Amino acid sequence: MYQRQVTFKEAVVSAIQQNYCNFSGRASRSEYWWFCLFNFILSTVIGIAFCWSQDTLNIVSCIVNLALLLPSLGLAVRRLHDIDKSGWWLLIALIPIIGWILLIVWYCKDSQMETNQYGPVPNLVG
């Protein structure tokens, strides 16, 4: 048995359409990082497209960030569930630098390859 890595499109569709405000279950490492890449690309495109007007850039950025806030938080919580940590560990990001580094290390960890208290292994192929 192995864990299938999701594609860029699958990760974005899963986070935005299927799990928009879902804080339960688990998310694979590939799903999390592909969605992070999507956020980065979208922010870059918006920054380039609206660089001529700082006011317009701020308004559009705020709208997009608000629209992606819940899927991003839900995905982060599900990623922590995948390594058998509570979603409340997200609050460690409030500790500057140390908290951020710890979260990045956790987000990079391999999935726990057995069912845990948060659900079955995501994308398991067997």
Image (cartoon, helix red, strand yellow):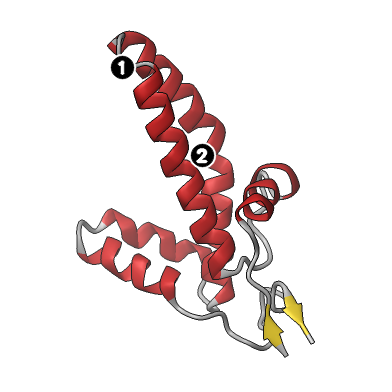
The residue labelled by disc 2 is 69
Q: Amino acid at mark 1?
A: Cys
Q: Residue at x 63, y 54 (%)?
A: 11
Depth order, front residue of 69/42: 42
Question: Which x, y percent locates residue 91?
Answer: 38, 58
Quadrant where the image shows the C terminus? bottom right
N-terminal label among 2 and 1: 1
Q: Is the residue 48 above or below the residue 53 in the image? A: below
Looking at this rendering, what residue extends furthest in the left direction?
97
Q: Residue at x 29, y 54 (%)?
A: 94
Badge 2 local density, few (<14 within 10 Å), some, or many (20+)? some
Q: Amino acid at mark 2?
A: Leu
Helix, strand or loop at label 1? It is loop
The residue labelled by disc 1 is 51
> How many angstroms separate mark 2 from mark 1 (CA)?
23 Å
Looking at the image, can residue 76 be seen?
Answer: no
Depth order, front residue of 69/36: 36
Helix, strand or loop at label 2? It is helix
Q: Is residue 39 left or right of residue 112?
A: left
Q: Is the residue 60 above or below the residue 117 in the image? A: above
Question: Which x, y percent locates residue 123?
Answer: 72, 72
Q: Residue at x 37, y 16 (%)?
A: 50
Label placed on residue 17:
none
Question: Which x, y percent locates residue 20?
Answer: 67, 44
Q: Is the residue 101 above or below the residue 76 in the image? A: below
Looking at the image, can residue 8 be seen?
Answer: yes
Badge 1 local density, few (<14 within 10 Å), some, or many (20+)? few
Q: Is residue 64 left or right of residue 16?
A: left
Question: Which x, y percent locates residue 1?
Answer: 73, 90
